[in-house]
Amino acid sequence: MSTMAPMAPIPVPESSKSSRKPPLKVVVALACKRVQDNICKFAKKGLTPSQIGVILRDSHGIAQVNSVTGSKILRILKAHGLAPEIPEDLYHLIKKAVAIRKHLERNRKDKDSKFRLILVESRIHRLARYYKKTKKLPPVWKYESTTASTLVA
C-alpha cells in the first residue's frame, strides 16, 4: 500500500449573486424641513458637521441625512451660510499640532513628539495645498505654527 499525501482541493470559480441594498430604514420620519432646521440649530451651537451627524443618528434615528433631505450636511450648512471657515479634517489636524506643540513646550527632550509634530505639520501643508487647489481655502491662506492656536480656539 502506498501512502500518498492528501491533495489540496481544486479551486473552483464561485459564481457571485447580484443583490441590491435594502433601503435605509428611517426610525423617526422627520420631514425634510425639520431635519434641515435641526442641522442649522446644531451648527449655530458650534457643532461640526460630523458631530451633527452623530447626534442625528443617535438621538433622532436618522441614519443618513442624504436619504432624508437629498443633500449632505455640509451642503445644507453651505446653503444656509453656516459652513465652517476651514474644512473639518484640516481643523482637527491643526488642533493636534497645537496640542503637540504645547506638550513640547513642557517636555523639550521628547524627540518622538517632535518627529510626530513634523509629520502632522507636513500633512497640514499637503491638505492645505489640496484645499487651495479645489478653492475650499483662499489662495493666500497659510498655516503658521505661531497663529495656529487662534485658528482652533
Image (cartoon, grey):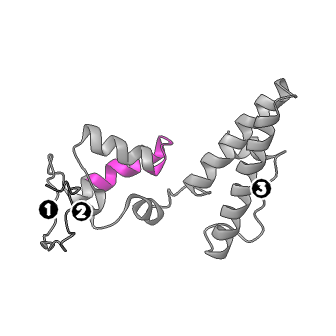
Q: Which residue is mark 1?
A: 23
Three-letter code for the amino acid on which mark 1 is drawn: Pro
Q: Is residue 30 magenta?
A: no
- Looking at the image, do the residues carrying marks 3 and 2 touch, with CB atoms under 8 Å apart? no
Q: Residues within 10 Å of mark 3 (few under 14, many from 20)?
A: few
Q: Residue at left 69%, top 56%?
A: 123
Which badge, 1 or 3, is on the more N-terminal residue? 1
Q: Residue at x 47, y 45 (%)?
A: 44
Instruction: Find the distance from the CA under tag 1 to the CA under tag 2.
Output: 9 Å
> Circle 1 sits in a helix, a strand or a loop, which is it?
loop
| 66 w.r.t. 53: above or below | below
| Marks 1 and 2, the one that precedes in the sequence | 1
The kind of residue tagged 3 is Tyr
Q: CA distance from mark 1 to mark 3?
A: 43 Å
Task: Note whether 81 is above or below 62 in the view shown.
Answer: below
**Residue 68 placement, left or right of 25:** right
Quarter of the picture holding the N terminus: bottom left
Q: Residue at x 16, y 71 (%)?
A: 14
Residue at the disc numbered 2: 67
Mark 1 in CB contact with mark 2 (< 8 angstroms): yes
User: Of tags 1 and 3, which is closer to the observer?
Assistant: 1
Say whether residue 152 is visible: no
Mark toward the start of the polypeptide (3 vs 2)? 2
- Write the residue at 25% across / 52% down: 34
Please state the extent of the stretch shown in magenta in the rendering.
35-49
Where is residue 60? Give x, y as percent: 24, 42
What residue type is disc 2 on? Answer: Ser
Q: Position of residue 59 (x, y in %)?
A: 26, 37
Q: Which mark is residue 143?
A: 3
For discs 1 and 2, the disc positioned in front in the rendered view: 1
Is 39 a magenta residue? yes
The majority secondary structure of the magenta stretch comes to: helix
